[in-house]
Image (spheres, rainbow, N blue to C red):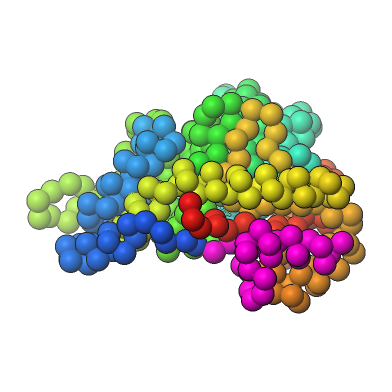
Amino acid sequence: MYKEIVGFIRAAFQQPEGFIALHEPKFLGNEKKYLVDAIDSTYVSSVGQYVNRFEEQMKQITGASHVVAVVNGTCALHLALLLAGVEPGEEVITQPLTFVATVNAIKHANASPHFVDVDKDTLGLSPEKLRIQLAAVAQVKDGKCFNKITGRRIAACVPMHSFGFPLRIDEVIEICSQYHIPVVEDSTESLGASYKGRATGTFGSLGTFSFNGNKTVTSGAGGAIITNDEVLGKRAKHLSTTAKLPHAWEFVHDEVGYNYRMPNLNAALACAQLEQLESYIRNKRSLAAEYRSFFKERGIPFVDEIAGASANYWLCTILLKDRADRDAFLEYVNGRQVMCRPAWTLMTKLDMFKNDVAGDLTNASWLEDRIVNIPSSVRPPL
Ligand SMILES: *Cc1c(COP(=O)(O)O)cnc(C)c1O
């Protein structure tokens, strides 16, 4: 069976031999043109027309009214948490099945993660488990939510759309609003994905994106914060640009700010990539369709978008029988230059987070043993 899978992947990528990456960037449009233009303009740092243009393109793509370009997805999350009102010593709910950056950002805000389980079908934060966990530990006082066991305020919730599969974000928002918990949507992996007709990232008070080299489209390194709240949008821009007050020549800063703005060079790359986002996603969805029928015929679960969701299929995902099957498969395919990866080790197992609060994580543990991401790059021609 493993041999047959390798054969299918090689045929799908028309690469009978050599290395097949899990996800490699493709530069098929105006990338070089815009980069040269940015260099010629001399505006290579954090001021320049491409940064503004990138923000306008992101508004178009997501439908958000405010977009702020930043240096990477981790900084986007850090800033979004501060903007959501997270203070040192508070608690932030997130899922244990995520990339470490989600939880690092919580720690960067000097807060503590509080882990709640994911759903087996979406791989993202489970509304049902969230409801159970909050019913057990949460108490609302004066419009604020507290964890009655730790005594800390639950200051935010960060659901994450794993591998570009939208989670049940509307239900998460509904529950969080009952408990007065702001939602920061970690949509770093789900650019171009939507749920019930709305772009992921626009459901929460703030949403975040990453344009790292391994994501659906890339700016080399880059990120974005989106929001429909004008006050938060303006504050995001202010805090990401050293909190400098506008003035023709004076340097006056009104709070401790961050040097988080995306450089024009990176934005030039991002603008060219965003122009191709739609065709990339169409391309990735056709690969997903091929994988779906192949794995279905062989009784191997292929992770699919749930009803109402449109995934970007950033990383196509299968579920193997158990951890032994997963490990044997990874050994086999990686040994044959077909790059496949397991899910991240659960955050609750990492030394930095193992003592943090966690609810029942049955689904996350089950998935951790079985998830395998398979090669998912865009296949030219578009
Ligand atoms: C990629 C990613 C990030 C961070 O993005 P960077 O641009 O690499 O800092 C955060 N959260 C998740 C879930 C990611 O996949």
Q: Does 174 sit left or right of 230 as displayed? A: right
The picture quadrant where one finds residue 173 is: top right
Res. 167 image quadrant: top right
Residue 162 in sight from this viewpoint: no
The structure residue drawn at horizontal position 37% and vertical position 56%, both measured from the top left corner, is 29
Query: Which residue is at the front of the view, 291 or 220?
Result: 291
Reply above or below: 143 against 217: above
Point out residue 179 in the picture as x, y percentages from the top left corner: 63, 26
**Any magenta on residue 106?**
no
**Quarter of the render that holds ligand 1:** bottom right
Q: Residue at x 64, y 28 (%)?
A: 308
Above or below residue 138? Residue 12 is below
Please give the count of numbered marks on the rendered protein.
0
Q: Residue at x 87, y 61 (%)?
A: 1
Could you tell me residue 57's position as x and y percent?
35, 42
Q: Which residues are magenta?
A: 1-24
Task: Give the image location of residue 345, x and y in percent.
Answer: 74, 61
Q: Along the line of sight, which residue is nearer the eye, 203 or 230? A: 203
Task: Specify whether 25 is left or right of 241.
Answer: right
**Residue located at (52% from left, 29% from top):** 198
The answer to whether 375 appears left or right of 190 in the picture is: right
Q: Quadrant of residue 373?
A: bottom right
Which residue ends up furthest to the left in the rendered image? 248
Residue 198 visible here: yes
Position of residue 325 measured from the top left corner of the image (x, y, whole percent): 88, 62
